[in-house]
Amino acid sequence: MTPRRRILILVTAVVLLTVVGVFAFARASSRAEEKNQPRAGGPAVSHGAVTLAPAGGGRRIVFRNMAWGPFRDELATVPADAPGGPRTASGVKCLRFHSAGGTGICLRSEQGAVQESYRAVVLDAQLKETASRPLAGIPTRARVSPGGHLVAWTVFVGGDSYAGTDFSTRTSLLDLRTGRYDASLEDFTIRKDGAAYRNTDVNFWGVTFAADEQTFYATLATGGSTYLVRGDLAARTVTTLRENLECPSLSPDGTRLVFKKRVPGLPAEAPWRLYVLDLATMAETPLAEERSVDDQVVWTDDRTVVYSLPGDFGADLYSLPADGGGHPARLMDSALAPAFLG
């Protein structure tokens, strides 16, 4: 092959790659612009005041608005007794969100000059930032303790190589009373089967807090299995309680956990079913949802849970009795990460 022919092939390849890149950028920009336009039949959304105060004008839901339009990804609110009604959007955008006790945790993206980064932002009842921390990866879970004094979040971390996997998780805790920040639950002492345990493949995710503002529950993954653990902030320990539990969520009365469980025989891409665990008896009750739910469920009260499933425009919310009876009911379209306040 002559030098001239090599140059011609190289120039042709560069031109083709440039055209492909321009086309991909234009397509992505067009898609992004489409999401900024309200869709026919979608929920009505307008800008207004949103509060996280426990007594902020009646019981309500604050959530990430997924409806297409100018308020997409913003924290929004509706009355709890009218979840399908008009939404009030705050102007604050979050990828993951939770709130309790007048405190919010917002995991958000920040577009830099070169690449996207992520940050955990603590919000007060008026959605003003009171503290923040950079995130080491992509946000996936967030929780606030019932009294609003503790916040936790989990991210997917690239670059770690645990047991041959292509990602790992990192879960952090922040005590707003003292300012103590635990960058990773992996620094806590693990007690498994009655003995201290250490392994390089340890991962944590899905924290849920008890009302005493010291005890928490979470998922521990190690050795190819997942475990429910109970954590003690003062002692800086986590203790395994039961195998095959992921993303626990503690009921308001502190007696039960709802969680997702891998069920043998289900497809690898949809392996989970929802269960409730009675902490006194350790008895499990399957819930009446036959679809695979990949979410950290929330409780509306001691009788009902709410979770997300993929929808036409991001995600929709469904409610379900926590006693194993009843049927799933669609609660809200185009919504994610709800917190029930008031």
Image (cartoon, grey):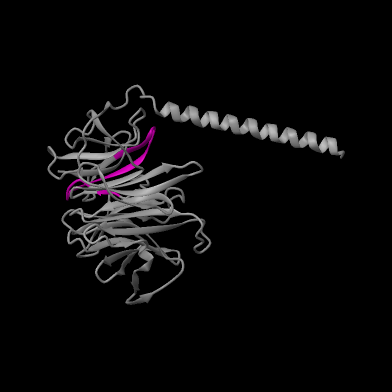
Q: Position of residue 95 (x, y in %)?
A: 36, 43
Residue that sits furthest to the bottom in the current view: 195
Left or right placement of residue 324 versus residue 182 in this view: left
Residue that sits furthest to the top in the current view: 40
* Above or below, 167 relative to 327: below
* Above or below, 163 relative to 105: below
Q: Is residue 151 visible?
A: yes
Q: Position of residue 39 (x, y in %)?
A: 36, 24
Q: Does the stretch in magenta take in 311?
A: yes
Q: Residue at x 81, y 38 (%)?
A: 6
Q: Nearer the viewer, residue 1 or 167?
A: 1
Q: Position of residue 98 (x, y in %)?
A: 27, 47
Q: Nearer the viewer, residue 262 or 236?
A: 236
Residue that sits furthest to the right in the current view: 2
Left or right placement of residue 176 versus residue 315 in this view: left
Q: Residue at x 18, y 37 (%)?
A: 80
Q: Quadrant of the N terminus?
A: top right
Q: Is residue 328 visible?
A: no
Q: How many marks?
A: 0
Q: Nearer the viewer, residue 196 or 177?
A: 177
The prevailing secondary structure element of the residues shown in magenta is strand
Q: Quadrant of the C terminus?
A: top left
What range is drawn magenta here? 297-317
Q: Nearer the viewer, residue 314 or 34?
A: 34
Q: Does the stretch in magenta take in 179?
A: no
Q: Position of residue 169 (x, y in %)?
A: 42, 57
Q: Image quadrant of residue 153?
A: bottom left
Left or right placement of residue 136 versus residue 2 in this view: left
Q: Residue at x 72, y 35 (%)?
A: 13
